[in-house]
Amino acid sequence: MLDQHGSLIDVWDRGQRSETFRFFDLLGQSVIKVEIDSPKSFTALLNNQRKLRVIDNSNHYESFSFDGLYV
């Protein structure tokens, strides 16, 4: 998760969470914009100005889709 300045504020990687666990801050927030960063990642901008970057590290399944684009 990134703050409004693009600084990393939390990470949840392969089931390992940080002590602060700020992901609850995302609950109830609307997605304002989605950017496809690469074939294996996207970033969602939320109405609280936080950004959630999702990175696919699996080669077995499709991970996400937006408006007919499957990644």
Image (cartoon, rainbow, N blue to C red):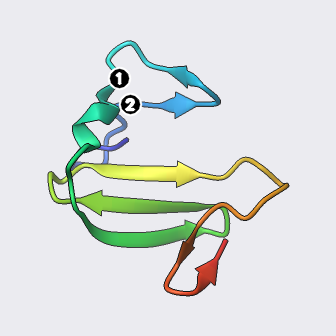
Please name which of the two marks, 2 or 1, marks the residue nearer to the observer.
Answer: 1
What secondary structure is marked by label 1?
loop
Q: Outermost residue, front direction?
A: 28
Above or below, 54 against 30 in this view is above
The answer to whether marks 2 and 1 mark residues whose Cβ atoms lie closer than 8 Å is yes
Q: Is residue 50 left or right of residue 68?
A: left
Circle 2: residue type: Asp
| Kind of element beneath mark 2 | loop
- The residue depicted at 32 percent of the width and 17 percent of the height is 20
- Tell me if mark 1 has few (under 14), some (14-19) or many (20+) residues whose alpha carbon lies within 10 angstroms of its own: few
Classify the position of the C terminus by image quarter. bottom right
Q: Which residue is mark 1?
A: 21
* Residue occupying the far bottom of the picture: 68
Residue 8 is labelled as none
* Count of numbered circles on the image: 2
From the image, tell me which residue sits under label 2: 10
The residue shown at (43%, 71%) is 35
The residue sitting at the left extreme is: 48
Residue 5 point in image, percent of width and height: 22, 48
Residue at the image position 20 percent from the left and 53 percent from the top: 29
- In this view, the residue in front, 31 or 51, is 31
**Marks 2 and 1, how far apart in space?**
7 Å
Depicted 12 relative to depicted 27: above or below? above
Residue located at (34% from left, 34% from top)? 23
Q: Position of residue 55 (x, y in %)?
A: 59, 51
**For mark 2, does the 10 Å Cα neighbourhood hold few (<14), some (14 to 19), or many (20 or more) residues?**
some
Q: Quadrant of the N terminus?
A: top left
From this view, report whether residue 45 is shown above or below residue 71.
Answer: above
Instruction: Give residue 2's position: percent from left, percent from top.
Output: 33, 44
Give the amino acid at mark 1: Phe
Q: Position of residue 3 (x, y in %)?
A: 25, 43
Spot the residue most to the right: 60
